[in-house]
Image (spheres, rainbow, N blue to C red):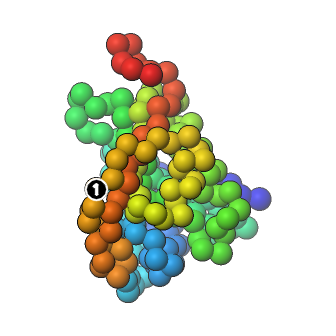
Amino acid sequence: MTEIVPLSGPELVTYADELGALLVETVEAGASVGFLAPLDRDTAAEWWRVRAASVEAGQVQVWVARDGGRVAGTIGLARAPLPNARHRAEVAKLMVRPSARGQGLGRQLLTAVERAAAEEGITLLILDTESGSPAERLYRAAGWTECGSVPDYAGDPAGVLKPTTFYYKAVGVVAEGGRG
């Protein structure tokens, strides 16, 4: 049975090696998550360890999906830092082990983040993904709205520039005076 849990900063450090391995697998499988191949596990694990301070400061939240004691996926939520943007956050680094894909885990992670954001008073979520990637099907099926595409926005794991599509989703109660 899969369990999705939020991590504290110290817990993120504890999970850094497993999350680093997940990140390496994700990049090796061709997902554009900000890293180029080849990515070594030590570098990937250190990237997660550095995020622990942002988690402890409340700027970022990270969840892991555990299946049989093993990390099967992760997702993050980055809060907007400016006073006029406290109502929104960015969904980031949704990753599912290649061996666990196609079983609904990505949707479960996305739902967990949407629910947590709404409970915290966040009313608008944004995210981006490589245009044409399998992730787009997930976001559309989960009720996200495409709002535009930017050519040559980010490099894929091989460093080839690809377009990126941006999505948004209203969650929770829309703040007074806002649009729904």
Describe the element under mark 1 as helix, strand or loop: strand
Where 66 sits versus 172, above or below? Answer: below
Q: Residues within 10 Å of mark 1 (few under 14, many from 20)?
A: few
Left or right for 103, reference 78: right
Q: Position of residue 12 (x, y in %)?
A: 46, 60
Question: Foreground residue, 116 or 91?
Answer: 91
Q: Position of residue 154 (x, y in %)?
A: 29, 66
In which quadrant is the C terminus drawn?
A: top left
Q: Position of residue 67 (x, y in %)?
A: 70, 64
Left or right for 2, reference 19: right
Q: Quadrant of residue 43?
A: bottom left
Residue in view at x 60 percent, y 47 percent: 141
Question: Foreground residue, 74 or 90?
Answer: 90
Residue in view at x 59 percent, y 44 percent: 142
Pointer 1 residue: 150
Residue lying farthest to the top in this orientation = 177
Question: Foreground residue, 156 or 66?
Answer: 156
Where 176 sits versus 141, above or below? Answer: above
Residue in view at x 32 percent, y 68 percent: 162
